[in-house]
Image (cartoon, grey):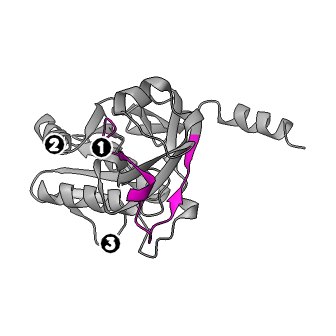
Amino acid sequence: KDGMGVLDWIRRSEVPQSKMVTYPRIVVDYRPEKDEPWRTRITAGGNLLQYHGNTTAHSASMELIKCHINSIISDPDARAATANISNMYLCSDLPDSEYVRFHRSTIPQSVIDKYNIAFDGEFAYAKINKAWYGLKQAGKIANNDIIKRLAAAGYEKSTLVEGYFFHKTSNISFTLVVDNFLIKYHRDEDLEHLMTAMRKHYTIKCDTEAKQYIGINLQWDYNDQTCMLSMDGYVKQALRELEHRP
């Protein structure tokens, strides 16, 4: 079993005949808002797997987020915070496991030794236990779980707009985009209640300066009741991409 319980290493004979086997996909990205901005992630090749259930996971729209920002700066007693969950998808179980195979050349010897991985020819097979990135159903499963866990702590999902939540009795609300929160709160105790509720299930970081949300830089001026939104380097990056187009 891997460190987070995402995979169980198995033999080829343990894969059910009714199941297809997919491939792992290595994704490399640069995320300047992260503590470690250079990111490498192994995901599942979900395009090879059949899934016929609902895969729609709703998030807050940009219009809603701007309305929420206006709500914060229009309230003299309100403050903003942002929060981000690490590896949210991997904190949700798959109700029906999927399967993946890795070529021997892609697995370091240290990993083979640590997990005592056995090979069938040139391939090692694994059972996927969690809502692994790349699976078609992963986003929906993870979204359903966070809504249930929020509800258990007293946070209701709006019936009018997607991605907006509020507490039943405390004066705190937030927009949610996948695993990113933009929070409006009045008391530190309310913010801490939300963080404590989430830490029962996830690793979550909170920024009480709310400097960035979904890749957008935020500059708050509570005295003048303004918030400046910007995306540093966006134009330069777009120009570089245009220069390299054929």
Q: Do the residues labelled 3 and 2 touch (CB within 8 Å)?
A: no
Q: How crowded is mark 3: few (under 14 residues within 10 Å), some or many (20 or more)?
A: few
SS class, disc 2: loop
Q: Is residue 5 found inside the magenta-colored segment of the image? A: yes
Name the outermost residue toward the right.
Answer: 246
- The amino acid type of the residue labelled 1 equals Gly
How far apart are the alpha carbons under marks 1 and 2? 17 Å
Relative to 75, 62 lies left or right: right
Residue where numbered disc 3 is placed: 160
Residue 146, image quadrant: bottom left
SS class, disc 3: loop
- Highlighted range, magenta: 1-26
Residue 225, image quadrant: top left
Q: Do the residues labelled 1 and 2 touch (CB within 8 Å)?
A: no
- The amino acid type of the residue labelled 2 equals Lys
Residue where numbered disc 1 is placed: 5
Q: Which circle, 1 or 2, is nearer the viewer?
A: 1
Residue where numbered disc 2 is placed: 200
How far apart are the alpha carbons under marks 3 and 2? 28 Å
| Residue 59 seen in the figure | no
Residue drawn at point x = 32 percent, y = 72 percent? 160
Residue drawn at point x = 42 percent, y = 49 percent? 126
